[in-house]
Image (cartoon, helix red, strand yellow):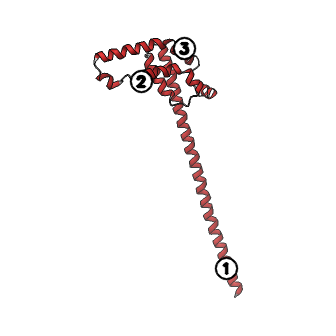
């Protein structure tokens, strides 16, 4: 009879061991699935960030080209470039190099745009237009030099990584 009781206890221990092993396998599988999902999420996030930076670079190159071809005003191009470059973690050297762009942006920030511009009377618009022309005239040469440099060596991830 003792043999039967011992055999039953061994059988219970074996069954419980198998159940515990199966449960641990489920835990390990769930942890692995969570790890894979996290890696996929990280990869998707990195891809989205890369696409955003590529879009910014492409936009900066188009703006530089448009400025050189007189398709866009100097002030408007500088405003657009400054806003886009604010999205990038630029080095101090790059910020200094593009300082004329940021200077035009800062000098024109107070000028109303869109609906606020339309709400101004013609006299106010003319005064702001004269101010814009004066800013553009004073900054034209350094801005053109920068745009020529950008056209010669367009923004790209490779040039960005080397500079920063």
Q: Quadrant of residue 128?
A: top left
Confirm or deny contact between disc 3 and disc 1 (CB under 8 A). Answer: no
Where is residue 15? Give x, y as percent: 64, 72
Q: How crowded is the residue under tag 2: few (<14 C-alpha within 10 Å), some, or many (20+)? A: few
Give the answer, above or below, for where 137 lies relative to 2.
above
- Report the residue that reaches farthest toward the bottom: 1
Q: Is residue 35 above or below residue 3?
A: above
Query: Is 1 above or below relative to 44?
Result: below
Question: Element under label 1?
Answer: helix
Q: Label 3: which residue?
A: 145
Q: Secondary structure at mark 2?
A: loop
Q: Is residue 62 visible?
A: no
Q: Where does the image place residue 59, in percent across and percent down from the top left?
A: 49, 25
Q: Earlier in the sequence, mark 3 or mark 1?
A: 1
Residue plotted at (62% across, 26% down): 163
Q: Earlier in the sequence, mark 1 or mark 2?
A: 1
User: Residue, x 68% and y 84% (percent of image)?
Assistant: 5
In this rendered view, identify the residue nearer to me: 147 or 104.
104
Mark 3 nearby-residue class (10 Å; few <14, some 14–19, many ≥20): few
User: Residue 50, percent across and down?
Assistant: 55, 34
Q: Determine which residue is flagged by label 1.
A: 9
On the rendered image, what quadrant is the C terminus found in?
top right
**What distance separates the C-alpha of mark 3 from that of mark 1?**
88 Å
Quarter containing the N terminus: bottom right
State the residue at coordinates (52%, 37%): 48
Q: Label for residue 109?
A: 2
Quadrant of res 131: top left
| Of labels 2 and 3, the one closer to you | 2
Observer-nearest residue: 6 or 137? 137
Which of these two is toward me, 4 or 27? 27
């Amino acid at each position: 009879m003792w043999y039967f009781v011992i055999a039953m206890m061994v059988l219970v221990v074996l069954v419980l061991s198998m159940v515990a092993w199966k449960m641990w396998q489920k835990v390990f599988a769930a942890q692995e699935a969570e790890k894979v999902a996290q890696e996929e999420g990280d990869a998707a996030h990195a891809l989205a960030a890369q696409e955003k930076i590529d879009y910014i670079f492409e936009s900066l190159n188009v703006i530089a080209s448009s400025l050189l071809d007189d398709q866009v005003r100097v002030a408007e191009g500088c405003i657009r470039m400054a806003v886009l470059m604010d999205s990038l973690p630029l080095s101090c050297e790059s910020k200094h190099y593009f300082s004329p762009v940021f200077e035009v942006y800062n000098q024109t920030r107070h000028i109303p745009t869109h609906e606020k511009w339309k709400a101004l009377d013609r006299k106010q618009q003319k005064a702001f237009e004269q101010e814009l022309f004066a800013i553009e005239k004073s900054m034209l040469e350094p801005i053109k030099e920068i745009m020529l440099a950008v056209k010669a060596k367009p923004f790209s991830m490779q040039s960005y990584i080397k500079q920063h």
